[in-house]
Image (cartoon, rainbow, N blue to C red):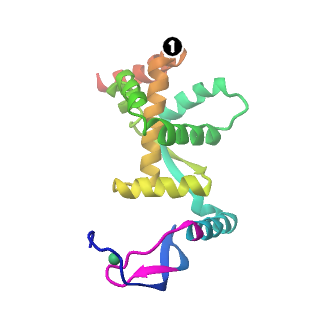
Amino acid sequence: MNNCNHDKHSKKEIVKEVLKCKFKFKTMVCNECGHYLWDKEVEQKFNLWLEKLYKNKREKFQVQIPLSENLRKCLNKLRRNYPSVTDTDLVRAIIITYLDHLSTNKKLMKMINENITEEIINSFAEPPFSSMKVQFRPKYTIKYLELANMIGSTQAKVMQDAVKKLMAFFVATDNELKDFWNTEIKKYIDMLVA
Ligand SMILES: [Zn+2]
């Protein structure tokens, strides 16, 4: 199938399922292998369709992200730097920064991985958890859905990991946050496992 030259093709309707909704479009489809053409025109139609979906079914663009109490405590502390920003806005910014800017950059990821410790990451995986509902623009939703599918995960999990990792980096590199983590989180974990 990979060697197909798509020589014989005809215009057909394709139904693509996105966010459990159907995007229908007509394009050139290979008679042999079913490969279809996704060109600028289809892309434009798709973006219009997405914007309409975003207006009418907003809940499709909201993700329930489970965050541990420990992580939320550090998040609250981090918010001192962003007094006018809501928790949700801050978490969205962290996710987009991590997934779009950091995770694709080997040099930056190396720096992050060298600073964070298992101990901090693990502290953010301790129950209890509660979900935070975060909304994303369609372009991010589509991108993160594809990313999650690619690695056989879910959007919520991919986002949860992003928040855990960047938060761990903040704790490891920000002295005030590190002190806070030591007295408010590490102390209790040490007590529980002693
Ligand atoms: Zn083909």
Residue identified by numbered label 1: 175
Q: From what the image shows, is residue 152 above or below residue 163?
A: below
Residue 161 belongs to the span the image colors magenta: no
Q: Which residue reaches farthest right? A: 84
User: For the residue labelled by badge 1, is the local secondary structure a helix, a strand or a loop?
Assistant: helix
Q: Which residue is found at the position 27% from the left and 69% from the top?
A: 2
Q: Which of 127 and 108 is in front in this view?
A: 108
Q: Position of residue 35 (x, y in %)?
A: 38, 75
Residue 136: image x %, image y %?
60, 52
Using the image as rendered, state which of residue 186 and residue 48 is in the foreground: 48
In the picture, measured across the screen, residue 1 lies left or right of residue 117, that is left
Q: Where is residue 81 in the image (x, y as percent from the top left)?
A: 65, 23
Q: Is residue 68 visible?
A: no
Vertically, is 146 above or below 26? Answer: above
Image-quadrant location for residue 165: top left
Instruction: Kindly identify the amino acid type of the residue bearing the numbered disc 1.
Output: Asn
Query: Which residue is pictured at 41% across the width and 54% down the height?
Result: 148
Q: Is 130 in front, or is 27?
A: 27
Which residue corresponds to the image point at 43% horizontal and 28% vertical from the top-left?
108
Which residues are drawn in magenta? 27-41
Queried whether the magenta region covers residue 33, the answer comes back as yes
Question: Percent x, y for residue 121?
Answer: 38, 31
The image quadrant of residue 21 is bottom right
